[in-house]
Amino acid sequence: MRKMNKPKIIMHNTVSLDLSIKNFDCDIGLHYQVAGNYQADAHLIGSITAKTGLQMFSEKIPPENESDFIKPCYGKDDKRPLWVIIDTKGLLKGIIHMYRRFEYCKDVIVLISNKSPVEYIKYLKDRNYEYIISGEDNIDFSKAFDILYSKYDIKTLLTDTGGTLNSVLLEKGFIDEISIILAPYIVGDSSINLLKSLKSKETINLELKKVEVLENNYVFLRYKVITKK
């Protein structure tokens, strides 16, 4: 039996002092500056995070044009990351072309399941998006990561997503490193925790790899996960 492979996975987030991922004035430029330093082959985000991001930064989603149906051409020297988006329900139907147009995105790969809407799969095919069917209802991450590693040569994957997906990946032992930018804010009652859905019954041990004070009182922390399932 062939050995299952997976990329090195780095969980990257900017959080407040009370570990909220939302409801404070995040320095987006600093967030992506640190993310870019990893030179990851791909970024992984969930569909809700992807849709929310578009709603936050785009007042109106422009309609598709002919170029949105054409798979982008890029060479081996193109260092931009692929964007891997989990979208089993087809939430990004009609708007995913905004990510294909994003100047810092080489192209998009969509993770779907066997129960994803048939019309959404047709939508992806018609627009020449790469997609991976993995799992019956929810994503089978072991299979998906193996395909990303073996077929698409993704050796380093950076997650930039919400508390649910962060929790699932950490709980299942897929996260190799945690990259945190600590913002000088305390959110309080409106806090949305970085690991809001974590159900691990075991302590997850970390090894501190780097501490750096950044501009505007932000602090960068980098940890290696040394206890994994």
Image: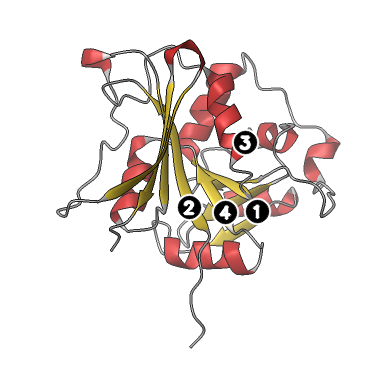
Secondary structure of the residue carrying tag 3 is helix
Whichever of labels 1 and 3 marks the residue nearer the N terminus, that label is 3
Residue 24 in view (yes/no):
yes
Whichever of labels 1 and 2 marks the residue nearer the N terminus, that label is 2
Q: Are marks 2 and 3 in contact (CB under 8 Å)?
A: no
Q: Are marks 1 and 2 in contact (CB under 8 Å)?
A: no
User: Residue type at mark 4?
Assistant: Thr
Whichever of labels 2 and 3 marks the residue nearer the N terminus, that label is 2
Disc 2 to disc 3, C-alpha distance: 14 Å
Instruction: Identify the residue position indicated by label 4 in the image.
Output: 156
Disc 1 to disc 4, C-alpha distance: 29 Å
Counting every numbered tag in the picture gives 4
Disc 3 to disc 4, C-alpha distance: 12 Å
Q: Is 196 located above or below residue 184 in the figure?
A: below
Whichever of labels 4 and 2 marks the residue nearer the N terminus, that label is 2
Instruction: Identify the residue position indicated by label 2 in the image.
Output: 9
Secondary structure of the residue carrying tag 1 is helix
**Image quadrant of residue 182?**
top left
Residue at 48%, 88% in the rendered image: 1
Disc 1 to disc 3, C-alpha distance: 33 Å
Whichever of labels 3 and 4 marks the residue nearer the N terminus, that label is 3
Disc 1 to disc 2, C-alpha distance: 30 Å
Instruction: Identify the residue position indicated by label 1 in the image.
Output: 122
Instruction: Identify the residue position indicated by label 3 in the image.
Output: 36
